[in-house]
Image: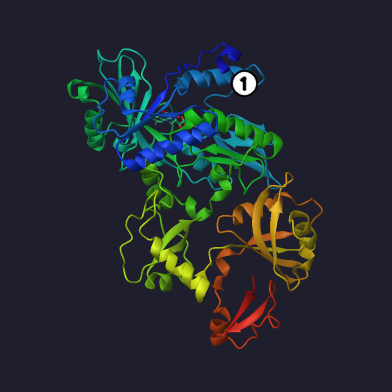
Amino acid sequence: SLEAETGQATGWKQTGSLSIATNPDRLTHIRRQASLSQAFGIGAEEISVSNAAEKWPLMRSDDLIGAVYSPSDGRVSPSDICAALIKGAKSQGLKVFEDTPVTGIRTENGRVAAVQTAQGEISCETVVNCAGIWGRSIATMVGAVAPLHACEHFYLLTELMDSVTAPLPTLSDHDGHLYLRDEGGGLLIGCFEPQGKALDIETLPEDFAFDLLPEDWDHIEPILANAMHRIPELEQTGVKMLLNGPESFTPDDRFLLGESPELRGFFLGCGMCSVGIATGGGAGRALAEWIIDGEPSMDLWPVDIRRFVPAQNTLRTLRERSPETLALHYAVSFPGRQHQTARNLRLSPLHSRLENAGAEFAERMGWERPRWFNPENKPTAPELSFEKPGWHSLHAEEHRAAREAVVLFDQSTFGKLLVQGRDAESVLQRLCANDISKADRRVVYTAMLNKHGGYESDLTLMRLDADSFLLVTGTGQPVRDKDWIRRNLNPDEFVTVTDVTGSYAVISIAGPNSRKLLSRVSLDDFSNYGFPYYTHRTIEVGPAMVRAARL
Ligand SMILES: Cc1cc2nc3c(=O)[nH]c(=O)nc-3n(C[C@H](O)[C@H](O)[C@H](O)COP(=O)(O)OP(=O)(O)OC[C@H]3O[C@@H](n4cnc5c(N)ncnc54)[C@H](O)[C@@H]3O)c2cc1C
């Protein structure tokens, strides 16, 4: 352990954790958490309500319908663990410079070259941006994207409570937006309240560090009522202290990890979304492997910085979204849940037509994409469900139309990359699994694979002319694909990659009546002979020239 290695205590106490459910959806949620943790070898298991009540004697349990207990969970002291990490690293030769603000980052040939500080410059090949709520400001120094924003985050400490004797498992009452544990003879009660509060870091003093923000009792009051419901004894217990600290939240409640696509050698390890202590060890190890080996040792796409585009990094967007991220931190993780804030960042040219046709939209990489069409305003509840959702029949209608008639999909949000230059063909041939030399008039559907044979991307590729290819990739993929191609170029290869996603709309026509529909708007030949399978060419649609691909 870290403590054995360094001789510095980390404050680790294995107290276990207890998650409770007051409704069937929450029960499904915590059961899923238990089975996921079992898959990772962590022994969380469902226990009875009476067993849960025995583990937390202060807790009201008559409204519970189930619980999950994880015996190997515990807690640490954040300052002690930080001291232990520093001690361990120093013993390996690391130097620590305290009170040394970073003022800039010098770059050379698209790479990090040095960190500039108030005390001078430090040459380096790699910078890791672990600046917490200031992570976006540091990234801005080099024009990199780091979508995170500070929010106020609260917990309170009660006076001593005679009934708090033994260490208690950390209690997650997420239906009440709460977590609770024993602390100093009383209780510590933290929350992720339904109305989060964004914090403008520009309002913090220049030397803000290890500090707290002003109390806000009005804000926290509804949560106190939930806490008193769960622990009735709190009605007779005084509050010793309300703590309000700043913490960074990202647009999707997952942290920002990995090498920035904007600058080689500039890594991110920030936006910890209030789980920086619990997950810091694993995130730190993953980051270290990423830096040393040039890739993470497992699939870390959910936290990879390349999942974001600059449109998601504006202050206005982040200020709007971050309180919702905080509010949803304890929400039931229904499939397909959509954020309500910071929407409509990127719209297809067909957006208003789709809207008029009754589209309900879902967000991906800042884009709005139709989820279903409901022109007659049929009831769609429940929209969020682990079971069959209310909009299922609307989806079914579209599936039927695609199978039996014809449908038009707006797929304008697909990522589009223009790969050009003298060596475009040979580079793509090296990176793609399929034979792209066939791409002349053919559409090539291919994977881009890494050295382990794993998928980096899944795309279609069309040759536009001798040294120019159009790659059409997934909506969430263009930043990653562009980065993958660029980082795999040899120094003597001449290729440019341009993200042209917003420059082209994509309309897909599918279904047995596709030809009939196209023949109504175009005089081109869509027969098997005139337009063979997996080919592409320019066609006329009404007055417009369109690149058409048959898939
Ligand atoms: C009230 C509260 C309760 C919490 N409870 C939990 C919990 O129970 N479990 C859990 O896992 N997490 C919890 N968290 C979250 C956790 O504390 C954070 O996720 C974690 O501390 C973030 O660590 P970090 O290293 O990313 O950022 P920080 O700890 O904020 O470190 C960033 C550092 O960067 C430095 N810095 C910034 N700008 C510059 C610059 N220009 N030059 C040099 N240095 C700079 C700062 O001074 C700071 O030291 C809680 C947070 C709060 C506020």
Residue farthest along the bottom direction in this orientation: 523
Number of callouts: 1
Q: What residue appears at the point 56 percent right and 78 percent down from the top-left corner?
A: 514
Give the side of residue 136 with respect to residue 155, left or right.
Answer: right
Q: Pointer 1: what residue?
A: 89
Query: Can residue 243 be seen at all in this image of the molecule?
Result: no
SS category of the residue bearing label 1: helix
* Quadrant including the C terminus: bottom right
Asked whether mark 1 lies closer than 8 Å to ligand 1, one says: no
Q: Residue at x 48, y 38 (%)?
A: 134
- Percent of width and height locating residue 185: 31, 14
Q: Position of residue 114 (x, y in %)?
A: 66, 36
In the picture, which quadrant includes the N terminus? top right
How dense is the environment of label 1, judged by Cα within 10 Å: few (below 14), some, or many (20 and up)?
Answer: some
Instruction: From the top left corner, tell me how far across and down residue 280 is, in percent.
Output: 52, 30
Q: Is residue 284 above or below residue 383?
A: above
Q: Nearer the viewer, residue 392 or 162?
A: 392
- Tell me if 365 is positioned left or right of 388 in this view: right
Q: In front here: 492 or 346? A: 346
The residue under the point 60% across, 57% down is 478
Name, please, the residue furthest toward the right. 492
Q: In the rendered view, does 60 fall on the left or right side of 508?
A: left
The quarter of the picture where residue 49 lies is top left
